[in-house]
Amino acid sequence: MADAALEEVSVLSSIYCGDGEFQLIQQSAQDGLMVQINSTVGGERRLDVRLLFHLLPSYPSCPPAISVSSTALSRTQCHNIRQTLLDQAAALPPEPMVHQLVEWLQQCVEVTEKCGEEEEELKEIDREEEWTAVLSLDHIRCRSRYIGLLERWSQTLQLSGSLLLGPSILVVLQGARPNIKEFCRLLKTVKVDVDSSGKKCKERMMKVLLESPLSPSCGHSLQGFLVKNYISLPELAAAFQEINMTELYQQILPSLRD
């Protein structure tokens, strides 16, 4: 078992020293360490969230396994928070990270609650309040991880989307405008890919080519999250025609030719 992990657990027990805040569940040379941290987060709404971290013997060379539970949040919300923490852990350097992840929990809960509030609001607004956006990505080198994150974010944020892979890499999104903005924020703040040297990197070069209210003539033309390859502009035009977005294609065409 790594000395760094044992030292981190000792430090964590000192930081989270309140009644019931910290508990060492397991300590084994074969199975590693398992610690439970109970945290109260959520701004005005004080929410009790229980985090379970399993630090394998190879930790911190590999991220911890994480479990999230709370009587104040739904199972889906807990799942989304857990996945966000796992994504963050995977993007961090291989060094002790549990305290950093617990601090990250506050932001995760705020985003989850915000999405929940917006979901309730969306039930009461007209379809015209939904938006369409076309994003341009700089590169996708680690294809499976990158596409997996895009699919997960679109599902979590209740967005329909299409990823078009070719000379230009485009993401077409449909859904609530705040959720589209959160999708863009995640692209620029989470390490989604690797650079030319193989180092994990964020999508800092992402551009929003177009953002506009959902056209009545277009309607909900996207379902789920689709991935499509194309080679030429005519093939790209055909792809936009298939999803009833020829007008949007004409609007972004000058940007694609730059």
Image (tube, helix red, strand yellow):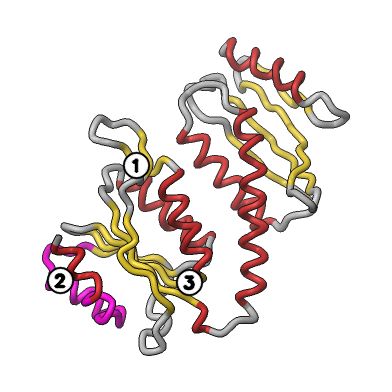
Q: Amino acid at mark 1?
A: Asp
Q: Which mark is residue 84?
A: none
Q: Which mark is residue 175?
A: 3
Q: Closer to the observer: label 2 or label 3?
A: 3
Q: Residue 115: x, y in percent? A: 61, 61
| Residue on which disc 2 sits | 235
Q: In the rendered view of the protein, which quadrant contains the N terminus?
A: top right
Q: Image point 41% across, 55% down: which residue? A: 150
Which one is earlier in the sequence, the residue at label 1 or at label 3? 3
Q: Image point 53% across, 62% down: which residue? A: 157
Distance in Å between CA atoms under marks 2 and 3: 25 Å
* Magenta portion: prevailing SS class: helix
Distance in Å between CA atoms under marks 1 and 3: 25 Å
Mark 2 crowdedness (10 Å alpha carbons): few <14, some 14-19, many ≥20:
few
Q: Amino acid at mark 3?
A: Gly
Q: Is residue 2 above or below residue 73?
A: above
Q: Amino acid at mark 2?
A: Glu
Is 40 positioned to the left or the right of 102 in the image?
right
Q: Residue 129: x, y in percent? A: 52, 79
- The answer to whether the residue labelled 2 contacts the one labelled 3, judged by CB atoms less than 8 Å apart, is no
- Secondary structure at badge 2 equals helix
Is 225 positioned to the left or the right of 237 in the image?
right
Q: Is residue 194 above or below residue 5?
A: below
Q: Image point 28% across, 61% down: which residue? A: 170
| Residue on which disc 1 sits | 193
Nearer to us in this view, 12 or 131: 131
Distance in Å between CA atoms under marks 1 and 2: 26 Å
- In the image, farthest residue toward the right: 19
Q: In the rendered view of the protein, which quadrant contains the C terminus?
A: bottom left
Q: What range is drawn magenta here? A: 229-250
Which one is earlier in the sequence, the residue at label 2 or at label 3? 3
Which one is earlier in the sequence, the residue at label 1 or at label 2? 1
